[in-house]
Amino acid sequence: MQPAETATTVEAPTRMRGIQLAGDRAVRLAELDVPPRGPSEALVRITMSAVCGSDLPHYRAPAGDLGRRAHIVPGHEPVGFVVEAAPGGVPAGTRVLVYHHSGEGRCEHCAAGEPMFCAGRETLGNHRHGADAEWLVAPDVSLVPLPDDIDDALAALIACNFGTAFAGLRKSGARVGDRVVVTGLGAVGLCVVIAAVAAGCRVIAVDPIPERRDFARELGAAIAVDPTAADPVAAIRAATEGEGAEIVIECSANAGAQRQATEAVRPHGTVLLIGSNSSMEIDPGVDLIRKEVRVLGTWIFKRHEIPAIFRAARGMPDLRRLLGESYPASDAQRAFAAVDRGEVVGKVLIDWR
Ligand SMILES: [Zn+2]
Ligand SMILES: [Zn+2]
């Protein structure tokens, strides 16, 4: 899916169309200034961005609570091509995805390719304008050149959701033959299902929406469980010979699901938390100590993991089945509403071409 325009035919403008979230679920397509470009920054023509579950708190927030974010373009899953390069940086014309955290560049975390831990962290769509606009000014160090066989839509999925699923599954320590419970079958959860099935795990998929459970089974999940049914933990135990699962990967950010995760994991097992924005109730004695359970958090992926993420994506053709819905920028309101209602199976993309 190559852009119709190329860097040589595109002039850098001073104004752009971009989304603003005005609070209370209002989405505006506004005429905005293209931000000024700093000395180590590039100007990228966006072709594809995407709506993420993590955009929803910003989308749903009351207008009065938005503060400076009322004026920030949202979006942290940008794909496009470089039109103006930083000196010595990724050249103009290069197709890129843009890694959404950047740091001040001098601390140990920046040096390790983990700018999300930098005290000076800036995140696209939060501290600076993000992906949901025709143009993006981004630090050159955040640009990730795309191989020809990773098209723009797949790259938008990799930029947050699949990268997160990949890094989380690795961090969980899941091994071939393990029983892996995945709670919350939004785009991240379905990416975890695909990756865990590909890794030879027996996957138990949990979500209240029947279409998502059906899709998870199509993707290779052995069993799908409705968490609103009588006793979902009993269903997971029954599916794991009464033992509980080696690994539970929680992607829903639902407090009930987080609770069930600690109940459904077996002794010496691992609960990996991906979904955030809720508070989790833990009984240390019952849930952790007397089962010797590990509870880990994971936050997107590290820069050094990107080559392996591309290799993994090539081996998982089912990822493309998540790329169903693509909305033109003029329809962004519908794109956000679709994710908000939770009725979408797969990834919602915004097409800026
Ligand atoms: Zn995201
Ligand atoms: Zn730093």
Image (cartoon, grey):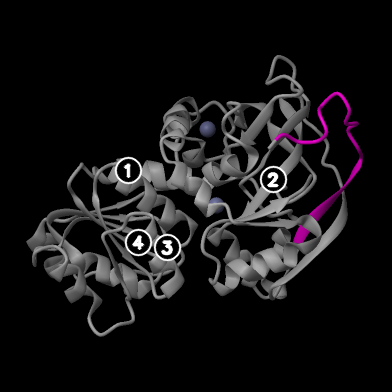
Residue 48: numbered disc:
2
Residue 215: numbered disc:
3
x then y, percent, for residue 200: 25, 44
Pointer 3 with pointer 4, Cβ within 8 A: yes
- In which quadrant will I find the N terminus? top right
For mark 2, give the secondary structure.
Answer: strand
Please rate how many residues cluster around mark 1, counting C-alpha atoms within 10 Å: few if below 14, some from 14 to 19, many from 20.
Answer: some
**Is residue 104 shown above or below 240?**
above
Ligand 1 contact, mark 2 (Cβ < 8 Å): no
Q: Which residue is mark 4?
A: 217
Looking at the image, which residue sits at the far front? 218
Q: Can the viewer see residue 300? A: no
Residue plotted at (22% across, 65% down)? 262
Q: CA distance from mark 3 to mark 1?
A: 16 Å
In terms of secondary structure, what is the magenta stretch mainly?
A: loop
x then y, percent, for residue 263: 19, 69
Residue plotted at (71% across, 64% down)? 67
Looking at numbered disc 3 in the image, what kind of residue is underneath it? Answer: Phe
Please rate how many residues cluster around mark 3, counting C-alpha atoms within 10 Å: few if below 14, some from 14 to 19, many from 20.
Answer: some
Q: CA distance from mark 2 to mark 1?
A: 27 Å
x then y, percent, for residue 66: 69, 67
For mark 4, give the secondary structure.
Answer: helix
Q: Which residue is mark 1?
A: 198
Q: CA distance from mark 3 to mark 4?
A: 5 Å
Q: Is residue 14 magenta?
A: yes
Looking at numbered disc 2 in the image, what kind of residue is underneath it? Answer: Met
Please rate how many residues cluster around mark 2, counting C-alpha atoms within 10 Å: few if below 14, some from 14 to 19, many from 20.
Answer: many
- State which region is magenta: 2-20
Please rate how many residues cluster around mark 4, counting C-alpha atoms within 10 Å: few if below 14, some from 14 to 19, many from 20.
Answer: some
Looking at the image, which residue sits at the far top? 88
